[in-house]
Structures are given as structure tokens and as C-alpha cells.
Amino acid sequence: DAKTTQPTSMDCAEGRAANLPCNHSTISGNEYVYWYRQIHSQGPQYIIHGLKNNETNEMASLIITEDRKSSTLILPHATLRDTAVYYCIVRAYSGGGADGLTFGKGTHLIIQP
Amino acid sequence: DSGVTQTPKHLITATGQRVTLRCSPRSGDLSVYWYQQSLDQGLQFLIQYYNGEERAKGNILERFSAQQFPDLHSELNLSSLELGDSALYFCASSPHPSEYEQYFGPGTRLTVT
């Protein structure tokens, strides 16, 4: 699985859009970008994933650059409950079986009131 | 609430002892994953089962073992416990190994004294 680089921490004002970057310059053609988050000591929560097209769901949007070497997770209207560690994970879709997820250190997003 | 349940929530035991952690996956999910989260190692994948069979191994110590039963619940057995085994242990489930989303339980906090 490709390595990812994320900022250690970020602040965002409540009600504003939170933009979390992730660098994955060694990503391969069959590797997807996933985002999970972990609110203090709770189990990680799936947010969104994508291959090359931008994706949006009820939680967030995922913007992947055309060369796929980086991506940005966007929380459109951040609330205090979005304070968490956000993990960007790159892994291949194996089709026949999947290993566990490889979590890095993630970005600690702090939403300020 | 992810639908994944884990028991017990907290466990305190002494070095050298053996404990069993239990996980019930979401209804209908066939694949179960175990993860360990400690302060120094972060979130690490331990082992995966699919429909009763071991599917993939991560950084699982030989002192640790797991199994998945016919009713799909899973148990993680930790033996000859050491102080360094103190951690949060998460179980996750997915409908199939190739599914992108893993649903995590609330975790079991193990303290070895």
C-alpha cells in the first residue's frame, strides 16, 4: 500500500469548511483513497473513499487531483463534533480478499467555537 | 452506533494472565478484523477472519490468537500478558473482505498491571 503524508494537526472555525490534505505521491493505478476518522478513543468511522473521480456523500467530499498524487477531504460546515483524528489511507482493491487497514498518524482536526 | 459490539468494555488484569475479548459483527457481516491501538504503536491491524476462516494476518504476536465461530462472532485470546499489551482493542466487520468500509466497534480497553 502507498504511503500517505498528512499534517499533524489543523484548526478550523465552527461553521466553516474544513479542508484536510493528504499526499500520496506513490499511489498505484489500482489503489483507492479512503478516509476514516476517530473521535477520542472511539472506534474509527468510515467517511468516504474514491479512485480518481471526486466523491461526495452526506458526511464529506473527496477531491482527488488529476495525477492522483494528492487528495483533500472537505467537511463543508464543520461542527464541534467533527473534532477528531482524520486518517487518509491508500490501499488496493484486491477483489479476492482484503488485509486490514494501515493507519498512519493522521491529522488531529480541532474545531474552534 | 456501528452495530458492532465488543465485550467487555474494560479489563484489568495482571502480567502473565490470559484474557479473552469478544466481538459480535454487524448483522450479515461475514468478515471480522481485530486491531490494537497503543500510545506508542498507533492503530495496528492484527488479524482478519472471513466466514470462520483466517484470511489475513498483520502484526499479531504469537501469544495472541483469534477465532471466528459458526455464528460469526469472534474472540481474541491474549496470553502471557505483558505491561506493553495494555491498549485499546478494536473489532471491525464488513460484509465481505473486498468491501471498502469497515465498521468498528467501541473497543475493549485492556490494562495490564
Image: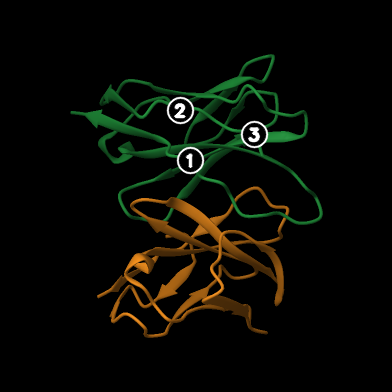
Q: Name the residue beneath numbered marker 3.
A: A2
Q: Are marks 2 and 3 in contact (CB under 8 Å)?
A: no
> In this image, B93 relative to A38: left or right?
right
> In this image, A95 relative to B5: left or right?
right
Measuring from the top left, give residue A61's x and y in whole percent.
52, 27
Rendered shade, chain B: orange
Amino acid type, residue under disc 3 in the picture: Ala
Q: In the picture shown, does residue B19 fall above or below A23?
A: below
Q: Name the residue beneath numbered marker 1.
A: A104
Q: Nearer the viewer, residue A53 or B32?
A: B32
Measuring from the top left, give residue A18's x and y in whole percent.
38, 23
Picture residue at 30% right of the left edge, 37% below the top: A83
Q: Name the residue beneath numbered marker 2.
A: A6
Q: Are marks 1 and 2 on the same chain?
A: yes
Give the Cα distance between marks 1 and 2. 9 Å
Measuring from the top left, give residue A19's x and y in whole percent.
42, 21
Query: N-terminal of the two: label 1 or label 2?
Result: 2
Label 3's element?
A: loop
Measuring from the top left, give residue B112's x and y in whole percent.
30, 74
Asked which quadrant contains residue A76, the reply is: top left
Q: Are marks 2 and 3 on the same chain?
A: yes
The chain coloured green in the image: A
Q: Are marks 1 and 2 in contact (CB under 8 Å)?
A: yes
Disc marking residue A48: none
Picture residue at 55% right of the left edge, 34% below the top: A57
Asked which quadrant contains residue B50, the reply is: bottom right
User: Which residue reaches farthest left?
Assistant: A113
Amino acid type, residue under disc 1 in the picture: Gly
- Residues packed near mark 1 inside 10 Å, few (<14), some (14 to 19) or many (20 plus): some
